[in-house]
Amino acid sequence: MRKAKVYRNNVFVGLLTEEDSGSFVFKYSDSWLLDKDSPSVSLTLPKRSEEYRLEYLFPFFFNMLSEGANKTLQCTRLKIDPNDNFGLLLATAQYDTLGAITIKPDKE
């Protein structure tokens, strides 16, 4: 099982987990849910206390990944299997993303 912390403008939003079965879970943090002014991560993941589950990486997070030649270069240099989307997300979405959302590996 691998986990990642999801941040919006450096504020913790929730936890994204890849389960051993290969399915994915996203759950908002309680503090994010309690703040009525905090927005949802995306339109496809509205704020709610129940966790979201999918058999594949949520499209919102998948769309943060590079494609084509950039993905090939990243996978080669970082020694990541091109089919390991979650691994690539953990390695590349920590700092310089095209929006307010960043993904950091959960070391706990």
Image (spheres, rainbow, N blue to C red):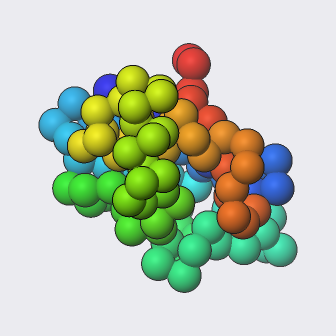
Nearest the eye: 96 or 70: 70
Location of residue 105 with respect to 40 vertically, above or below: above
In this rendered view, identify the residue nearer to me: 46 or 83: 83
Q: Where's residue 16, x and y in %?
A: 47, 45
- Inspect this view and state whether residue 29 appears: no
Does residue 46 appear to the left or right of 50 in the view shown? right
Q: Residue at x 48, y 39 (%)?
A: 74
Could you tell me which residue is drawn at 46 percent across and 66 percent down?
63
Q: Position of residue 7 (x, y in %)?
A: 70, 49
Question: In the visual, does 28 lie left or right of 61?
Answer: right
Find residue 56 and report its horizontal and vertical position in percent: 25, 56
Instruction: Give coordinates of residue 68: x percent, y percent.
Output: 38, 59
Left or right: 74 in relation to 11: left
Question: As displayed, is residue 73 above or below residue 106?
Answer: below
Quarter of the image with the N terminus in it: top left
State the image quarter where residue 59 is shown.
Answer: bottom left
Q: Residue furthest left?
A: 21
Asked whether residue 98 is in view, the answer is: yes
- Farthest top residue? 108
Tell me the residue at 42%/54% (across/down).
69
Q: How many numbered badges does the structure rendering display?
A: 0
Residue at the farthest bottom position: 43
69 over 89 or under it: above or below: below
Quadrant containing the C terminus is top right
| Residue toward you, 66 or 19 | 66
Q: Residue at x 41, y 60 (%)?
A: 67
